[in-house]
């Protein structure tokens, strides 16, 4: 009786496995097909992300202030009072104007005090900023700050192990 019972269980299990195989085989094929499509889609997505980051770098890599010809920059009048009024019109601090132009804050303070005058590309940048409004100036400053932060993030920091070794 036990042998008959075991034989019946084995036959039922074999039949069940066969039925499951018939149901699972098409599903397995579908899973493989979907995995292949996911790999392809992932490849396309990676390519698009790279392209988008390249475009962002190109857009951010543009000049921080509008370009001005050399003749226009040389002929423009830039008195200390004009530099200060430009800065106030744009609603910028000396530090913010310095970041936009690409100089230090004390340099802007010297320009406004009349101790120094902007030369070369700094002069051209100031003349270019005359064509910019308050909102555009804020956007340019935000883009400039974002660029400097991304440059800082790329720099490798020395490990703490090296510092400890150097102290000994």
Image (cartoon, rainbow, N blue to C red):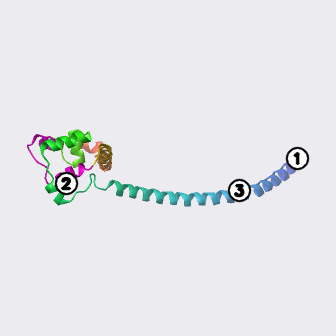
Q: Quadrant of the C terminus?
A: top left
Give percent across and percent down for residue 116. Answer: 9, 46
Range of the magenta residues?
107-131
Q: Position of residue 74 (x, y in %)?
A: 14, 56
Q: Secondary structure at mark 2?
A: helix
- Mark toward the viewer: 2 or 3: 2
Q: Which residue is mark 1?
A: 5
User: Which residue appears farthest toward the left when viewing the image?
Assistant: 115
The Cα atoms of the two marked residues, 1 and 2, are separated by: 97 Å
Is residue 168 visible to the viewer in this orientation of the structure?
Answer: no
Q: Quadrant of residue 134?
A: top left
Among numbered discs 1 and 3, the one appearing first in the sequence: 1
The residue closer to the viewer here, 156 or 52, is 52
Q: Which residue is mark 3?
A: 27
Q: Which type of secondary structure does the marked residue at label 3 adopt?
A: helix
Give the overall secondary structure of the magenta segment. helix
Q: Nearer the viewer, mark 1 or mark 3?
A: 3
Query: In front here: 18 or 38?
Result: 38
Residue 59, image x, y percentages: 35, 55
């Amino acid at each position: 009786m036990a042998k008959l019972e075991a034989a019946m269980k084995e036959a039922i299990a074999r039949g069940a496995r066969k039925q499951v195989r018939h149901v699972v085989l098409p599903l397995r094929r579908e899973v493989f097909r979907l995995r292949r499509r996911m790999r392809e889609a992932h490849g396309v997505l990676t390519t698009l992300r790279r392209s988008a980051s390249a475009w962002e770098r190109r857009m951010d890599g543009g000049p921080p202030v509008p370009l001005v010809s050399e003749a226009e920059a040389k002929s423009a009048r830039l008195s200390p009072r004009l530099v200060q009024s430009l800065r106030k019109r744009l609603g910028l601090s000396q530090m913010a104007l310095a970041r936009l132009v690409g100089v230090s804050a004390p340099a802007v303070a010297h320009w406004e005090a009349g101790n120094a005058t902007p030369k070369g590309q700094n002069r051209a940048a100031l003349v270019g900023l005359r064509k910019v409004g308050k909102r555009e100036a804020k956007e340019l400053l935000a883009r400039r700050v974002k660029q400097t932060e991304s440059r800082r993030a790329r720099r490798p920091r020395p490990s703490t192990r090296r510092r400890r070794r150097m102290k000994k």
